[in-house]
Image (spheres, grey):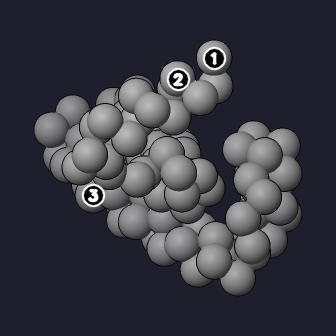
Amino acid sequence: MLLSFVLNRTFVFRSRAQSRATAPRFVAALLLAFCLNQAVLFVAAHLLGHTTVERLAAQLVAMGSYTTAFFLLCRLWVFAERGDLDPVPADLSQVSRDEQGRR
């Protein structure tokens, strides 16, 4: 888990946020994705059946849900740049003044 955190933080998302802030969110995202994986695996196994091929198909569906959920949680929550999540300013005239100052 530590290696996964370091590699994701450094190479995948290139985050400069402090580890104290991102590490707890990383663990929470990992647990949420794992719970989703188990739920999808349970449902898929019951819907698809119990043969070897059907169990493998259920596992593939669950792996896909885990990977997608974990990536999105990391991208949008764990390692998101705080500026990316700021709401639109109430005074839009300030935005246009800022843009004019850049030109």
Q: Amino acid at mark 3?
A: Ala
- Disc number lying in front (3 or 1): 1
Q: Residues within 10 Å of mark 3 (few under 14, many from 20)?
A: some
Quadrant of the snapshot with the N terminus? bottom right
Query: Do residues under tags 2 and 1 come within 8 Å of each other at their CB atoms?
Result: yes
Q: Is residue 99 above or below residue 52?
A: above
- Secondary structure beneath label 1: loop
Q: Nearer the viewer, residue 92 or 32?
A: 92
Q: Amino acid at mark 1?
A: Arg
Dividing the picture into quadrants, the one containing residue 6 is bottom right
In this figure, which residue is indicated by the disc labeled 3?
A: 39
Quick one: label 3 or label 2, which is nearer the N terminus? 3
- Secondary structure beneath label 3: helix
Q: Is residue 23 above or below residue 53?
A: below
- Residue 27 percent coordinates (x, y): 57, 74
- Residue 42 percent coordinates (x, y): 26, 54
Q: Residue at x 40, y 66 (%)?
A: 32
In this figure, which residue is indicated by the disc labeled 2?
A: 100
- Disc number lying in front (3 or 2): 2
CA distance for labels 3 and 2:
51 Å
Dividing the picture into quadrants, the one containing residue 12 is top right
- Residue 24 percent coordinates (x, y): 58, 80
In this figure, which residue is indicated by the disc labeled 1?
A: 103
- Residue 103 percent coordinates (x, y): 63, 17
Q: Amino acid at mark 2?
A: Gln
Horizontally, is 78 left or right of 76 in the view? right
- Secondary structure beneath label 2: helix
